[in-house]
Image: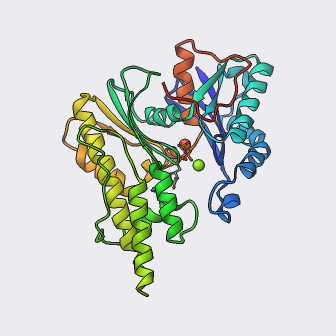
Amino acid sequence: RYIVGIETSCDETAAAIVKNGREIVSNVVASQINSHKRFGGVVPEIASRHHVEQMTIVLEEAFKQADMTWEQIDAVAVTEGPGLVGALLVGVNAAKALAFAKQKPLIGVHHIAGHIYANRFASEFEFPLLALIVSGGHTELVLMKEHGKYEMIGETRDDAAGEAYDKVARMLELPYPGGPQIDKLASKGEASIAFPRAWLGEDSYDFSFSGLKSSVINTIHNTTQRGEDINKEAIAASFQASVVDVLTTKTWKAAQVYHAKQVIVAGGVAANKGLRDALTAKFSGSGIPLLIPPLKLCTDNAAMIAAAGFVNFEQGKRSDWDLNANPSLPLK
Ligand code: ATP
Ligand code: MG
Ligand code: FE
């Protein structure tokens, strides 16, 4: 079975073709980072306009790289939410038009289900499976007992991990997107500043990063008030140590409590070297296999949407022609 995936939830326009939910045939991503950089973040209106310009180009490229035609395609999967509504609409409308014209089933996909299924290109899933989702808009621990079913066991009460990275990067006057910049600086510095860790109680799998963020602001403020230079490397390393410590500890605990047969990491922050190293160290020799996608599949792409869409397809789940973008679509 060949599924076409379409993703336009944020600032990458992406199209891909995936075979049987496990094999990438083509995977094309057009990033808009350069257009948003000078604003220090994603500007929704600019994002939508870029998606309109890029959508057909990216789709044609996906078919060209796959050396395939529409006759060989079994279904069209598209991100229906969550994300920026104007951005999502471009992908949803493109998918609807194509599915209708080519007479293929239409399948709406949850963006985070996509991030989770980015792991299935490397290994088949084993249930119960614990997924740590760390992206620009989400920080969640999700338990899966079967394909296509998601139970949220913990989530962030304020900022997402990626959001915290981007905000701290902005305070350190680093270019957008800040996550990779902080990651780089952190590897050059000592985690010498004791920033807080939000545990939120013994049995909680929830997260919070706003206190940490305030603590970083205060440190920068107090240092400059004293007329001293800020040590960006030390701040980045200490901030990252706090984030990684909380994420790793809670994931480890949940994996034990829920008897996870597999732990997977998903979302843009899964690209973080500090997090990858800490999780790998924690789980190595534990008997619980840890999966982290290759860097290219951590951030937004359409192969992951096609992979998640394949599961819906196999389960007979289809979307109607009134499929709409839903910026706050719940994962369930
Ligand atoms: P969501 O998936 O929640 O809708 P999104 O699609 O914007 O949000 P992703 O594309 O999954 O998010 O990830 C982007 C985020 O990942 C940004 O916040 C970015 O700073 C962060 N990020 C990317 N690489 C790294 C890294 N090496 N270290 C830390 N953060 C990173
Ligand atoms: Mg993005
Ligand atoms: Fe994403």
Which percent across, then down, holds residue 168?
47, 63
Q: Residue extending furthest top? A: 316
Question: Which residue is drawn at the image coordinates 43% and 60% (left, top)?
Answer: 213
Which percent across, then down, holds residue 27?
60, 40
- Identify whether 167 is placed above or below 152: below
Name the one closer to the observer, 302 or 248. Answer: 248
Q: Quadrant of the N terminus?
A: top right
Question: Which residue is drawn at the image coordinates 38% and 70% (left, top)?
Answer: 235
- Identify whether 133 is placed above or below 295: above
Q: Residue extending furthest bottom? A: 227
Which percent across, then down, holds residue 20?
53, 23
- Identify whether 324 is placed above or below 197: above
Which percent across, then down, holds residue 57?
76, 43
Name the one closer to the observer, 313 or 252. Answer: 252
Q: For residue 284, which quarter of the picture?
A: top left
Question: Which residue is drawn at the image coordinates 56% and 12% (left, top)?
Answer: 316
Q: Is residue 5 left or right of residue 90?
A: left
Question: Which residue is drawn at the image coordinates 40% and 77% (left, top)?
Answer: 222
Q: For residue 52, which quarter of the picture?
A: top right
Q: Which coloring applies here?
A: rainbow
